[in-house]
Image (cartoon, rainbow, N blue to C red):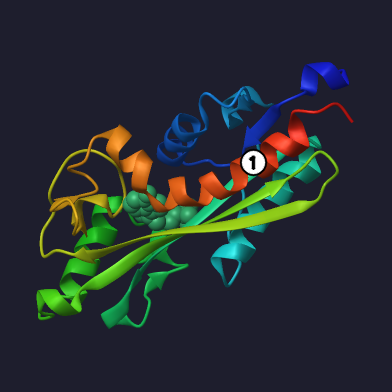
Amino acid sequence: MSKSTLKGTLVIATNNPDKLKEIKDILKNNDLKLLSPAELDNFPKIEENGKTLKENAIIKAKAVWNKYHLPCLADDTGLEVDCLGGKPGVYSSRYAGANATYEDNRQKLLREMENIPQPDRTARFRCVMAFIDNNGIEHITEGTIEGEIIDSCRGDSGFGYDPVFLVPSSGKTLAELSVDEKNKISHRHNALKKIIPVIKEKLMRDK
Ligand code: IMP
């Protein structure tokens, strides 16, 4: 591909369709050509074996950079529950086991927190974004959202732990907010907001 064809092209390096949808939605209106894994040949199955969110985000972005040599963006996210010492954290997707579903993970979390009173159920989502630019240089940002874990699921929107994550200022879980409402306040939005200027600076000019 010529350099002008590539201008503004960014691969979203995730195999998770829920994240892909949110990232694309938050990045829209930035004049970027977003490429999804489905649009690339043989998109790699990436093993997330890092010990931190940052390591995992970099592992995912590097796997894509090494294969296609295209600028790419990867997200790694964890739910940190204070009364559980920050768990499930980096293990959020595998909290209830290697092949756990979103529902398995939510139910395990609710069981672990069964006797914890509401004031002690504070938690946050932490999202680390890794962007690899057209010269192979890494850029990292982080975004969080503070909230509380409630004692049962509420709402059908969103994904993962959204139905148990209360946003105190709205009185709603992330799964009770609309897609637009979540994408204006989420950890993912907050991490992307910081990295968008860097992406645009690196990708929108010819090199
Ligand atoms: P990973 O970043 O792909 O390792 O995903 C971690 C896990 O955190 C996912 O499997 C989801 O269960 C959960 N997760 C990530 N982002 C969100 C979110 O925005 N809302 C709710 N759960 C999330």
Residue 192 % position (x, y)? 53, 45
Residue at the (14%, 77%) spot, across then down:
119
Q: Quadrant of residue 121?
A: bottom left
20 sits left or right of 18 in the view: right
Residue 112 % position (x, y)? 20, 76
Q: Quadrant of residue 18?
A: top left
Q: Quadrant of residue 196?
A: top right
Residue at the (43%, 32%) spot, across then down:
21
Q: Which residue is mark 1?
A: 197
Residue 166 % position (x, y)? 19, 57
Instruction: Give, as a three-letter code, the residue at label 1.
Output: Pro
Residue at the (44%, 67%) spot, across then down:
91
62 sits left or right of 15 in the view: right
Figure check: 9 above or below 182: above
Quadrant containing the N terminus is top right
Residue at the (70%, 53%) spot, across then down:
139
Query: From this viewpoint, is residue 42 visible?
Result: no
Q: Nearer the viewer, residue 141 or 84?
A: 141
Query: From this viewpoint, is residue 169 visible?
Result: yes
Q: Nearer the viewer, residue 109 or 192?
A: 192
Figure check: 113 above or below 182: below
